[in-house]
């Protein structure tokens, strides 16, 4: 390598990025009893088409693609991704407590299992469309959590899902603020 050649680096620092979460405590991670049907529902939230795994992957991809030119925005997206990682971890704990497995497959309504795939992601090139896709994904997640809360009769599980919804609502607020900058 030539000694005079200038290296290309990303000037954006991610030091100190914290999870973008509502400033509220989480309820204890506990269940009223084992329930495979509930574990299957949470498996969809864990790694289905609309899931925490999809959200993490989409946010990290978006953050990587914009960090060189839009550092502040990228730091916010990384903070949201870290919060989604915490949601994934909490869902995983609940699934195991309910008697389910963590294997990156979601049991669908027809009884078949489908492994998570990046085909679930929406990755537009334009930053505005990227943020709009992120807002829509958060809204879809909230709708799915609300539907699962109606289907789950375990108040311990539902308390965690209701708390996750608070974070997803906070993420929408952050994303809408970022849209104002574009």
Image (cartoon, rainbow, N blue to C red):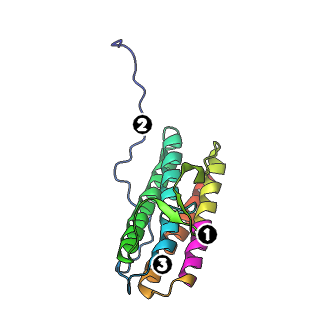
Whole-angstrom CA distance, mark 1 to mark 3, is: 15 Å
Q: Which residue is mark 2?
A: 11
Q: Tell me the residue at 58%/55% (across/down).
A: 178
Whole-angstrom CA distance, mark 2 to mark 3, is: 45 Å
Q: Secondary structure at mark 3?
A: helix
Q: Are marks 2 and 3 in contact (CB under 8 Å)?
A: no
Q: Nearer the viewer, mark 1 or mark 3?
A: 1
In magenta, the rendered stretch is 140-150
Q: Tell me the residue at 65%/49% (across/down).
A: 128
Q: Nearer the viewer, mark 1 or mark 2?
A: 1
Camera-nearest residue between 114 and 144: 114
Height in image: 10 above or below 182? above
Q: Main secondary structure of the magenta part?
A: helix
Tell me which numbered mark, 2 or 3, is placed earlier along the sequence: 2
In the displayed structure, does residue 127 sit left or right of residue 41? right
Camera-nearest residue between 169 and 140: 140
Residue 76 within the magenta-colored segment of the rendering: no
Tell me which numbered mark, 1 or 3, is placed earlier along the sequence: 3
Q: Which residue is mark 1?
A: 110
Q: Whole-percent x and y of residue 97?
A: 35, 76
Whole-angstrom CA distance, mark 1 to mark 2, is: 48 Å
Q: Which mark is residue 38?
A: 3
Q: Can residue 182 be seen in this snapshot? A: no
Residue 147 within the magenta-colored segment of the rendering: yes
């Amino acid at each position: 390598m030539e000694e005079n050649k200038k290296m290309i680096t990303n000037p954006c620092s991610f030091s100190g990025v914290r999870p973008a979460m509502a400033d509220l405590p989480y309820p204890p991670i506990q269940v009223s009893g084992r329930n495979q049907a509930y574990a299957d529902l949470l498996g969809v939230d864990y790694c289905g088409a609309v899931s925490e795994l999809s959200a993490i992957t989409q946010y990290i991809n978006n953050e990587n693609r914009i960090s060189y030119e839009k550092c502040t925005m990228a730091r916010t997206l990384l903070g949201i991704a870290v919060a989604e990682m915490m949601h994934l971890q909490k869902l995983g704990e609940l699934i195991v407590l309910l008697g389910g497995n963590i294997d990156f497959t979601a049991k669908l309504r027809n009884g078949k299992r489908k492994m998570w795939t990046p085909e679930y992601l929406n990755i537009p090139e334009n930053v505005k469309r990227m943020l709009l896709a992120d807002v829509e994904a958060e809204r879809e997640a909230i709708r799915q959590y609300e539907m699962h809360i109606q289907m789950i009769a375990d108040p311990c599980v539902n308390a965690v899902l209701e708390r996750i919804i608070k974070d997803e609502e906070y993420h929408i607020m952050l994303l809408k603020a970022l849209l104002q900058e574009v």
